[in-house]
Image (cartoon, rainbow, N blue to C red):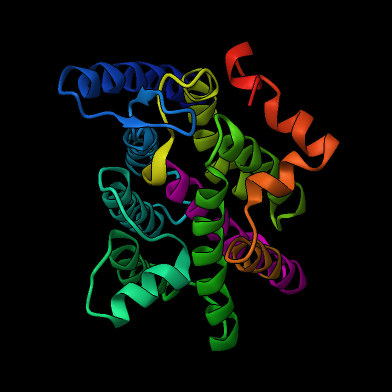
Amino acid sequence: MTEALLLLLAPLGTYWAGRRLIIFYEARLAVKPNYRGKNVAPALGPALLLSYLVVAAANLWLGNDLVPWIPLTMLLLGTSFYGLWDDFMEESVSGFAGHLGAGLKGSLSAGLLKVITAVPVAFLFTGTLPLPLPLRAVAVLAVLFSANGVNLLDRRPGRALKVFFLVGLLLIFAAKPAPEAARMLLPLMAAAVALAPFDLLAGGMLGDCGANLLGAALGAAAALYLETQALLFFTAAWGAINLVSERLSLSTVIEKNGLLRFLDALGRGEEEKLT
């Protein structure tokens, strides 16, 4: 009963927080151009984080400790925090190679700062897992690749959220045990539903803060609840997406495939479907 109530309240609270964030950004002219050049709120991720924190705190106070809420909270706080740097800074470089190259030349970019922070955050979380050392190393990569992978897909309205929902459902289906994975992911999925109208209609961007948070949550769920072969597949798949994105535009790949293009445009406003 309590979990059902939290699932109901999570999207309501997230929708309210998302709307207030948009008003907050616009009132302070803290907006950024999206892919169409329209100035929109740059980071709706804090609304997701707030919703998650309320759910995690409620579960801990009620003694529902089947999910490792505290290590997971540390991970999601860290990924949200470093994502905000990219949301509010303009960069002249992109991609891991670009940020690393800038760093080797003595220039610290927001992207490189994010990588430097992401690694110890991922190690902190995976260090709590009851896994042998080799699988802990895989879990680190699962969290990092997934967090960055969802962010790489956040280039068009609603795209990252759709991927999060799809992968989240697949994880719950494949998890051992599935109920614990559902307890962890469903509150975030419910909260993400509430942000979908803002994201799909380009009222605001999910941003690195939100995309990194959702991706890290998927990686954490995979590390916690997937069996070894499934975890290896999950990590390899996200690793491939990260690698491909260094050479090709994921948006171009999606646009060239009819089915992917249809799914990508699904739910967007008519104006957004034109590109």
Image point (53%, 45%), residue name: 184
What percent of the width, then of the height, locates residue 12? 43, 16
Magenta stretch encompasses residue 223: yes
Magenta stretch encompasses residue 194: no
Say whether residue 24 is left or right of residue 101.
Answer: left
Image point (40%, 40%), residue name: 207
Furthest-bottom residue in this view? 133
What percent of the width, then of the height, locates residue 99? 37, 68
155 up-or-down from 275: above or below: below
Q: Which residues are magenta?
A: 210-235
Image point (23%, 69%), residue name: 108
Magenta highlight: main SS: helix
77 up-or-down from 135: above or below: above
175 up-or-down from 172: above or below: below
Furthest-right residue in this view? 258
What percent of the width, then of the height, locates residue 156? 56, 34
The answer to which image quadrant residue 159 occupies is top right
151 up-or-down from 138: above or below: above
Q: Which quadrant holds the C terminus?
A: top right
Q: Is residue 5 visible to the viewer in this orientation of the structure? A: no
What percent of the width, then of the height, locates residue 60? 36, 44
Furthest-left residue in this view? 28
Q: Is residue 235 visible to the viewer in this orientation of the structure? A: yes
Image point (78%, 38%), residue name: 260
How many numbered marks does the figure carry? 0
Furthest-top residue in this view? 270
Q: Nearer the viewer, residue 59 or 191?
A: 191
The answer to which image quadrant residue 93 occupies is bottom left
